[in-house]
Image (cartoon, helix red, strand yellow):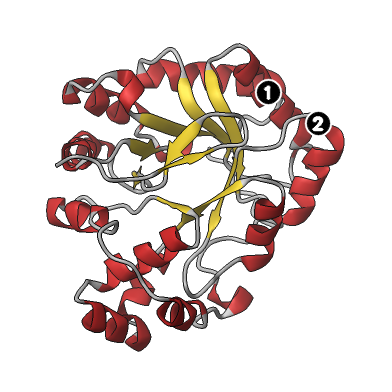
Amino acid sequence: MASTVPNISLNDGNSIPQLGFGVFQIDPKDTVQAVRAALDVGYRHIDTAEMYGNEAEVGQAVRESGLDRREVFITSKLNNGFHRPDDARRAFDSTLEALKMDYIDLFLIHWPLPTLYDGDFVSAWKTLEEFRRDGRARSIGVSNFQVAHLERLAAETGTVPAVNQIEVHPYFGNEEVRAYDRGRDILTEAWSPIAQGKVLDDPTVIDIAEQVGRTPAQVVLRWHVQRGDIVFPKSVTPSRIEENFRIFDFELDDATMERITALDKGEAGRQGPDPDTFDYVPR
């Protein structure tokens, strides 16, 4: 199956496939098979992280696929335990070693951790700037950054993040951060795009799915891409992996988009941690 996924331009001149495949919480022993299945379907964007523990398996799957490295966009993220510059440098080296690649397409600060490291996520960001300058990270960005965090980067550094990967789904539109991103030419990437499955049972989503002849997951993923965000659903089931890929051959009209957007519960809809207080560091 040929890939039909649009590429979106980043603010640094590179581009990124709008639909990717996420490997969060996929056991390392299942990662190679899942990523191979995704690549076989046509995905060309894989999102991993040091804290997921499966970077090596992602790299293995790409090598085994027979695809040229340049055909697959790979994202990884800095482990929360390695924000200090020298630690970040070693962690980035470890990521490249695990993937067995000499560059990564996009490297992110996974969480801002404003209550740790004396609140200093800026020095970590300046270290990512080094990786971009030396070409080992083609693009750099952030994940889970709130408006205040982004404003601090803008005030104290010279590089605007290419992306901000944040929690977004119909129950939590995260509109303030999305609007800030949009105004600064930062692309928003939506993690937990179906709210850990919770929105799939929503009566409105089910009704829309029946009307357009699609599954609830396809409807919600289509809503994301029509809003202009990058999205990367996760599954280890081949049929679901393929289902999630088939979202570029239909459209939702404006009224339908508004029905889904209206499901937003504000902060009460957040499923994951609050980036202003999250302080998890792997031990």
Q: Is residue 242 above or below residue 195?
A: above
User: What is the quadrant of residue 275 in the picture?
Assistant: bottom right
Q: Is residue 136 left or right of residue 41?
A: right
Q: Earlier in the sequence, mark 2 or mark 1?
A: 1
Please name the amino acid that badge 1 sits on. Glu
Residue occupying image coordinates x 47% and y 38%: 51
The local crowd at label 2, few if under 14, some if 14 to 19, many if 20 or more residues have their Cα within 10 Å, is few
Q: Which residue is mark 2?
A: 157
Spot occupied by residue 270 in the image (x, y as percentages of width and height): 55, 70
Residue occupying image coordinates x 50% and y 77%: 261
Spot occupied by residue 72 in the image (x, y as percentages of width and height): 33, 29
Dot label at residue 77:
none
Q: Which residue is mark 1?
A: 129
Q: Are marks 2 and 1 in contact (CB under 8 Å)?
A: yes
> What secondary structure is marked by label 1?
helix
Please name the amino acid that badge 2 sits on. Thr
Q: Is residue 200 above or below residue 186?
A: below
Spot occupied by residue 152 in the image (x, y as percentages of width and height): 82, 43
Residue occupying image coordinates x 22% and y 23%: 67
Spot occupied by residue 35 in the image (x, y as percentages of width and height): 24, 38
Q: Is residue 182 left or right of residue 31?
A: right
Q: Is residue 115 visible?
A: no
User: What is the quadrant of residue 246 in the picture?
Assistant: bottom left
183, 23: nearer the viewer: 183
Q: Is residue 183 visible?
A: yes
174, 236: nearer the viewer: 174
Q: Is residue 19 left or right of residue 254?
A: left
Q: Work out which quarter of the rendered image holds the N terminus and state it.
A: top left
